[in-house]
Amino acid sequence: MKKFSVPSAYTIAVIFIFLAAALTWILPSGSYNYKTESTGKVIPASKVKSYSGPERLLPVPNTYSKIKPSHQGITDILQAPIKGFYGSVNIVAFILCIGGFLGVMNYTKALDSAITNLILKLKGKENYLIAVLTILFGLGGASFGMAEETFAFFPLLIPILLMAGYDTFTSILIILLGSGLGCLASVVNPFAVGIASNFIEISIGDGIVTRIILFVVCIATAIIIILRYAGKVKKDPSKSIVADKKEELEAHFLHNKDTNDIPEFTVKRKIALTIFIGTFLVYIYAVIPFSSLGLTFIPSLGWSFTQMSTCFVTSSVIMGLCYRMREIEIIDNFLAGARDFLGVAIIIGIARGISIILINGLIIDTILHSSVALIKSYSSYTCLSLIYFMHIVLSLFITSTSGLATITMPIMGPLASFIHIPKDLVVTAYATASGLVNMFAPTSAVVMGCIIIGKIPYTRFLKYIIPKCLIFFFITLAVMLISLYVKLHF
């Protein structure tokens, strides 16, 4: 009897596209009336899908109506991954450019030399590195919603921790939980809390104490979880969730496994490493929205994925020239590096296709309307819990935090006043739900990308991550309910 083989991440994502399409045949199609953000022009529910204007649309409360069904058939299913790929082209290009940059860097062996020396110096102190990196990625998520931007760091961190005796999943946990929980707390994240607060007409500073508490508690819990897993793997490599792929992963990520045979740190390699580090420093500075965070004295570059991709391509060429590579060597190594990331780019397009099916099927507003109708009849504590759970469900369909805020906050603002819940807690419930779901959902580009990079079967990943997400679910719910009690009684 042939042994059952767990489907790949690609197949699982396609299965979810079929399931999403099935929902469009089960749930009734419906929509709110929408209005344009700047001019306030009302777009009737029946014409929302065909709207192609330049302004963002915001739903008008209490205007939901059922409309002509938009069932998603086999043609829509087959086209969804392609449309998802086109819709994610900025992220796809960014990922391929990072891969090319790393391909040129790997040719120099400067990183091999630097990593080996770093591991020798950190002998016995790796736990501190894990804790510090988790906090740093957490700060990135909490301050500017660091998510897809983390793809640049996987190939950098994985070899370091592999040589320290850990596995690829340790690196994935540091980046995924660190940035993911930072996004969950979204202390001053302008792309999540900032947008949501604006729609609901409160300051981004409202509720900041609750979000800071969430950040501290969740990141501290994450560090404990990661250190326990990392320690177990280092003591017994067979405990790794990718133990069966150990040799394959080491061959892929490590170009120099023998610490007694360190590549000589020549002047050319020092220059290459300086360019490498400088590129990341420029990249990090350029994506932080200092002005949105109130730091107006620091110039904000506000780079998009276009500028970030350009940065990595330009640095690849500069590095190659400084290392005295021939033109064909620069091109060949860049293409080889990009090829290593092709699987990540493809899975992101497929995952985006799930959301496209659900949005085109016109069932998102139906789910929102039904949830709001249910919430109204309960106590404030139950309502807050239901609002949190509702946003978890919606986040499975809408992975963009700003997109989720655009759809739900105009509805939630008036509802919060009606059910006596402080508006800042509604914003916190939305942000935490989105952050939580984007740490495990197949619609999350970061999740699907990192399991491809780490060569981890999605089902195996879920088996480990779901219990951890449940821990964070109860932590966030408890913090919000305690905060609600304090706000109502003091």
Image (cartoon, rainbow, N blue to C red):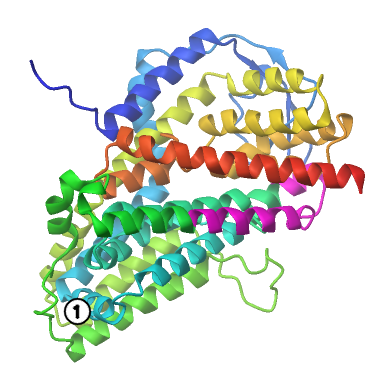
Q: Dot 1: within a 10 Å radius of its alpha carbon, few (fewer than 14), some, or many (20 or more) residues?
A: many
In the rendered image, the vertical position of residue 105 relative to residue 85, given as above or below? below
Q: Quadrant of residue 367?
A: top right
Element marked by disc 1? helix
Q: How many marks?
A: 1
Is residue 204 shown left or right of residue 119? right
Is residue 194 shown left or right of residue 76? right
Front residue of this view, candidates 439 and 197: 439
In the rendered image, the vertical position of residue 244 relative to residue 293, given as above or below? above
Residue at 30% over, 36% down: 460
Query: Whole-percent x and y of residue 261?
Result: 9, 79
Query: Whole-percent x and y of residue 218?
Result: 57, 53
Query: Whole-percent x and y of residue 47?
Result: 65, 21
Task: Tell me which segment is drawn in magenta.
Answer: 196-222
Query: Whole-percent x and y of residue 200?
Result: 79, 42
Residue at 35% over, 52% down: 93
Front residue of this view, candidates 395 and 119: 119
Q: Quadrant of residue 457?
A: top left
Q: Is residue 327 visible?
A: yes
Residue 21 highlighted magenta (yes or no): no
Helix, strand or loop: magenta stretch: helix
Residue at 50% over, 50% down: 180
Front residue of this view, candidates 367 and 253: 253
Q: Indicate the amino acid at tag 1.
A: Ser
| Quarter of the figure that contains the N terminus | top left
Toward the bottom, the furthest residue is 267
Residue 201 highlighted magenta (yes or no): yes
Circle 1 sits on which residue? 113
Front residue of this view, candidates 109 and 333: 109
